[in-house]
Amino acid sequence: YCSILMDEGETQNPAEDLSKRQRKKLAKRKKWLEVRASKRAAEREKRKVKIKEAKLNGIDLGPSRKSLKKNKMGSSLCKVHVVIDLSFGHLMSERDTSKCIKQIHRCYSHNRRAKSPLQFHLASFTPTVKSGFDKLHGFENWDVYFHLDSYHNEFPLDKIVYLSSDSDEVLDEVKDDHYYIIGGLVDHNKHKGLCLKLAEENKVRHARLPIDSYMEMKTRKVLTVDQVFALLHYAASNDNDWKSALLEVLPSRKGAVLKSSPTSDNAVLSADQDSMGIVCDNNVCKKDDSSCLDGET
């Protein structure tokens, strides 16, 4: 996709070479940069007031930002690796790419607030991909492993598991020192089966999450990238208790209910096409020709 995002102090020229749409986006970006500082200051003041009121009312706001700064992946007891595969930018519109980035941002926020963070990786983090992240102020300082190369060149092939709803294999347990790949692709069902195909071509193991083993869904439902990330983290932190993980992570509005006994057929989840797919290729928990979950599970 084509990005015209600018860093502070950067100028775009010649402006006359830009289309009307690009000039409009450029002006919007410029305005956003101008108000960002004041908005951040207002947010800090608002947070101070919130903290003060919470203390007066005896409300626990969770870990402080100061304590979170000490909570790094390197010192985490959790050695499970979760990798977002960012090699699909050429298959997405700018809008879908933006949605993907928002999902990843929420994954990062979740991990930073965890007592034992996952080992979080972004693979195929090319200059083109980076340009999409530039709007996230300070992302360069994230406690994340950035990899320019693809996942299958960065990690041991025998330790990789690519998550895909098209897989016949079910992920029963999350293991330390293994790398669980989430395909960063929002494709509106245009590239169904792509991630499974790529996993097979790269000769790595693939699997789908065991959601349909424990849950019944009233309708086809969507999981976002950060929900899949949270499911992996919860399972990793609680001895692969998938039932509790699903109850903890899945919103009640999704209408999911526990099965009377674990089985491996039923509920179907489709990829979040409007917020970004996760776990490559229909990471719906069950294989289904009509669902596309590229980037979810």
Image (cartoon, rainbow, N blue to C red):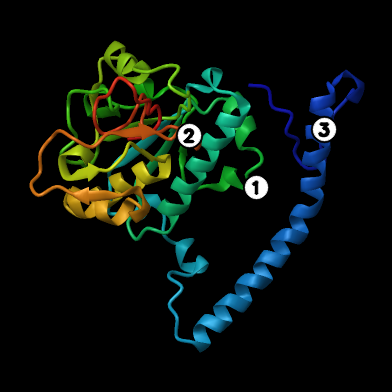
Q: Is residue 83 depicted above or below 74 in this figure?
A: above
Q: Which residue is mark 1?
A: 137
Which is nearer the N-term, disc 3 or disc 1? 3
Is mark 3 in CB contact (under 8 Å) with mark 1?
A: no
Which is nearer the N-term, disc 2 or disc 1? 1
Crowd rating for badge 1 (residues with CA inside 10 Å; few <14, some 14–19, many 20+): few
Q: Is residue 58 depicted above or below 295 in this figure?
A: below
Q: Which mark is residue 276?
A: 2
Q: Amino acid at mark 2?
A: Met
Residue 38 located left or right of residue 83: right
Q: Is residue 237 visible?
A: no
Q: Nearer the viewer, mark 2 or mark 1?
A: 2
Classify the position of the C terminus by image quarter. top left
Q: Which residue is mark 3?
A: 24
Q: Is residue 120 visible?
A: yes
Q: Secondary structure at mark 1?
A: loop
Classify the position of the N terminus by image quarter. top right
Which is nearer the N-term, disc 3 or disc 2? 3
Q: Nearer the viewer, mark 3 or mark 1?
A: 3
